[in-house]
Image (spheres, grey):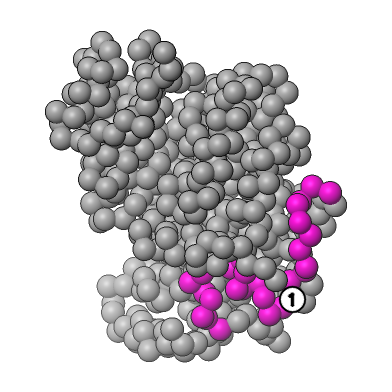
Amino acid sequence: MSASSYSDQQQHSATAATVDAAEPAQTPATLDMRSMIAQSGGDPVRLAQLILAHGGLSNANILNALHAQLGMQNATRVTTEVLRLQHRLNEVQSAPAEQPASSSGPTKAPLTSATPAASAAPETLATQPQVTPQPQVTPQAQAAPQTQTALPPTHAPTHHATATHAPTAHAPATHTPAADSVQLEGTLNQQIETEVCGVIITAPVGVHPSMIARVTAIIIQEVGTNRFAQDRFRSERVSLVIIPAHVAMTDLPELAQLRGQHTFDGRDWSTVRGVGGTRSRNHRYTFAVAEETLANVPGVKSTYPATYSVAMHELAHVLNDMALTRSQRTRVQALYREHQSRDRGDAAGTWTDQYASSNEDEYFAQATNTFFGRNQMSNNRNGRDALRATDPGMYELLVELYESPRDRRGDTIVA
Amino acid sequence: MSDRHWDVYDGERRVLTVSSAPGAIVSTAHLPAGQPARQCAFMSATSHSPDHEHRFNQVLEASRTVDEFVDTLKADGLAVAER
């Protein structure tokens, strides 16, 4: 889409608004959005910067107004730009406290202003215009372009990098991970879809919009540098559905085929708050996570602690199913056999527990959580240092998989 | 006697892995924190397909041996390959 390609629709919308007496009452967000669209001059990147400066995706009213004004396709384009800027900003803000000198595997050269979009940003933006500093943007929106010249290694994320709260005008960014809770300023009143690194994110009505940024950060962490996985996900139409906190998973159209059925271990699917890949009626390969597992939602109790990421685990399963090379799969199998020969899961002082030890798939998915520091559910050890100390083979594999850029064939890209 | 292992396919897609070793019955639905996996006295298995799990659960409930479980899946039209 060209920088000005939504201008016609914008013009149409504005015109329609002046003659349609039945138009709903204008909210402050609607007025803000019209003002921002006008200020952007038809440039989606500029509009994304303005939205970020006005609170990003933390305010559902802004997102709802965006869709009302521009329509689904153009709004998705702008939303993706906002997510990219947010992610870059979060990385920069969390970087100083996140550079373990000895625990991040191979040393990576800092990225320059020319490379971050290609290496870590959503794949769909690879051909889009680069973000360029705008002279008249607000101070917060300026923060992203200013720091592009010396970004930290975006492909060496640590567990802190999963802090995904969007910096807003009301919540200035700090160097500490954001609290894992959200203030519900509003939820989506229409379904949002956007694609990140080959994964279609579906946020149904009722989801808090900040959840989109949260799952985006996780997707980028796991496959942001892996072109092979991104291509596979795209061809298989992989979709991540965010289950609204107050909605049963089986009430969503994407998962309605499970309604009235039970899981293999006998649970009613309607009580489940996350699921691995299933073929939906729309032929997508869908996996789902509940929003209360992404952040604390007031009034809703999650069945997982905040120190555990279900989304990261489920995405690791999809990666395992679709996007490991043959040699990587063989290594996982061998590592699992080796692990089982010395520890059936309950050995003290290791990163594993019975769940991780139940089969090679869970072993891989739980190892991924451990690698990113999001596997604190029982007495197991958590974090990459624990993984390296107690399971060095798996640690080496995950360093290669998650921190070494991969081309479309799955081979490591050597700089 | 060593454990036996099977892969179960629906078309090209692997939907289940089964072992004759007693152990966990693992769903694609993530277990809540701290909840132990369901155990089976005559087999262990891991599902890879949410859509098949209702039937897997029914077959498991009706089976008394791993062979009976696997044979029922074959009768359902799934392809079963022993490793």
Whether residue B49 is situated above or below residue A339 in the rendered picture: below
- The percent coordinates of residue B22 (x first, y second) are 41, 14
Q: Is residue A118 magenta?
A: yes
**Residue at the (48%, 30%) spot, across then down:** A359
Indicate left or right for A300 with A110 as reference.
left
- The percent coordinates of residue A12 (x first, y second) are 34, 86
Q: Residue furthest front?
A: B1
Q: Which of the pair A341/A151 is nearer the observer?
A: A341
Q: Which residues are magenta?
A: A102-129
Indicate left or right for A384 with A235 as reference.
right
Q: Is residue A258 visible?
A: no
**Residue at the (53%, 89%) spot, across then down:** A41
**Residue at the (26%, 55%) spot, across then down:** A283
- Mark 1 — on which chain does it sit? A
Question: Which amino acid is tagged 1?
Answer: Thr
**Residue at the (62%, 35%) spot, across then down:** A375
Q: Which residue is mark 1?
A: A112
Whether residue B12 is situated above or below residue A4 in the rendered picture: above
